[in-house]
Image (spheres, rainbow, N blue to C red):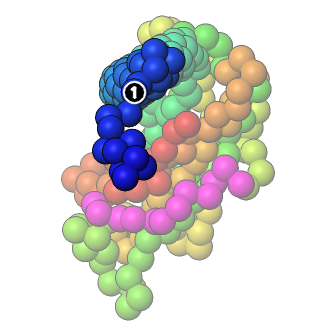
Amino acid sequence: MFWKKRKDQPKEISPSTYQKEDRIAEAILGLKYTVADNADADRKQERREDIGNKLLQVATLLFVILTTVGIFYQASILNSSDKSTHESAKAAKDAADAAKTAAEAATVSNRAWVAPRVIFIDTIDPPDNIKVKVFYENTGKTPALDVSFHSEGKFLSQLDGSVVPEDRYRNVRMGENESCEIPAISFAGVAYPSSPQVQSGSFFTLSLINLVQLTKDVKVILIIRGCFKYRSEANWHKSTFCSYLEPNQSLPIEKWAFKDCADGADAD
């Protein structure tokens, strides 16, 4: 019974027990604060990381924008530069072309130009020789050097021997004038720029059996094709011409005039 009484009797708590309990409570409370502090620190870290990520995203976006703007700006500069370069090159080419054109115009305006001035029948030598004289002149501004005269005679007629129609000889076309390729008839040397008193002449003779009578009867039309070769300064040039003797039976044959063909005249 005594034992029972002791068991039911309240247990006495010593001061050291209270101290232990206080330390445990303090430890638990400290742990709680530590956990809370760590949680708060984690949240702050997360916020910092989130802010950092957002700042990084903003910086990346700004970098992309600035890079794009820079690319477009450089492209604009390059395009402007290319356009300016193209315009400068075009201006330089235009200036060079203009200078070349001016130089060529100056050369053309100052060079020698040799061409026939008048062609006529000089004499008729029996029985059937017709001597033709060609007066030519230099209409340019500088002397023509090493002038040579080349010429050939042609005859236009009908296959049946009838009279040559007027519309045929007035529109006669002899094709390419190759008289420059035949041997020279005369060498005039220097032809100076013309004045009313300065002109040169060259003779050549056409011969054909019964030529004079056939010409008078308009059964043969005389055609003269010629070429002048000459040098103007360092450059060689040539002038070609083609003329036909136009019938005029109201006049003696010596008075008939030479007229230009429809082709065969050229100069370079």
- Can residue 138 be spotted in the picture? no
Q: Is residue 123 above or below residue 217?
A: above
Q: Is residue 221 above or below residue 51?
A: below
Kindly state the secondary structure of the residue where label 1 is placed: loop
User: Where in the figure is residue 172, as x and y percent of width and height?
Assistant: 35, 65
Left or right: where does residue 36 sit relative to residue 112? left
User: Where in the figure is residue 198, as x and y percent of width and height?
Assistant: 54, 12
The quadrant in which the C terminus is found is top right
User: Where in the figure is residue 145, as x and y percent of width and height?
Assistant: 73, 21
Which is more toward the observer, 222 or 216?
A: 222
Residue 228 location, quadrant? top right
Left or right: where does residue 19 sit relative to residue 111? left
Residue 91 location, quadrant? top left
Residue at x 38% of width, y 33% of height: 11
Q: Amino acid at mark 1?
A: Glu
Residue at x 46% of width, y 39% of height: 119
Q: Which residue is mark 1?
A: 12
Which is more toward the observer, 233 or 181?
A: 233
Which is more toward the observer, 158 or 226?
A: 226
Please state the extent of the stretch shown in magenta in the rendering. 170-181
